[in-house]
Image: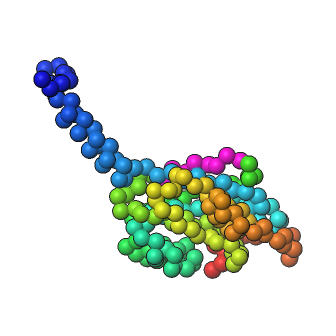
Amino acid sequence: MPHHWTSGSMSVPRTITAWILLAGSLALAGCGAGTAYVRGVSPLNVNDNNESAPVNLRFYQLANDDQFLRATFESLWLDDAKALGGDLVAKPVVTTVFPGSAGDAPVKVPLGKLKAKTAFIGVMALYRKADARQPRILVIPAERIDRRIILLSGYGLALDGEESALVEPQPEKPSSPARSTTPIGKAGK
């Protein structure tokens, strides 16, 4: 005799209920919510007064990483949809990372629901100026986005365990006492 669960006047065999639950779980796994973890480490995005400043990060859901890796920083900054074309799966999520220390807990960044076509997450740091020695973009396979910490320091970003890609910015000598009016992310044009 098959086992049945009873709800009111309805009886549903357990095997059917189990299959329904399994199918629902698998459907959700293909397009679940994504989460990234970030940590800003001083010196970070140093301003004209040699003070660390916050950095905006963009997270892109990508079907393929080719266009993202070939695009120039400027083309992504000015018209990311055009630069990424069909590789762009969803509008980017933007967050601000504040300076801290290497011992700080990483900050959780909800990326929203990952689309079924999302294979990679492209990350772009919008520093106020560029340092050619440091990367400002990186790509992470979508299934690993919640397993790595994205570190920001100086004018670059790297994944935990790859900190050697980050170099400490050299202090600048201010040319005048006036503060820079360049908005974050507008340098390097």
Q: Is residue 103 above or below residue 138?
A: above
In this view of the protein, which residue sits in the foreground, 63 or 96?
63
- Residue 158 in percent (x, y) is at 64, 64
Quadrant location of the N terminus? top left
Q: In terms of depth relative to the viewer, which is nearer, 32 or 51?
A: 32
Say above or below: 153 vs 10: below
- State the residue at coordinates (63%, 80%): 189
**Residue lying at 23% horizontally and 39% vertically, measured from the top left:** 19
Q: Position of residue 48 (x, y in %)?
A: 80, 69
Asked if residue 56 can be seen in this view, the reply is no
* Helix, strand or loop: magenta stretch: strand
Q: Position of residue 141 (x, y in %)?
A: 48, 62
Residues in magenta, as a range: 104-111
Residue drawn at (61%, 58%) of the image: 150
- Viewer-side residue, 55 vs 115: 115
Left or right: 145, with 104 as reference point? left
Given residues 60 and 188, the one toward you in this image is 60
158 vs 146, left or right, is: right
Q: Is residue 46 magenta?
A: no
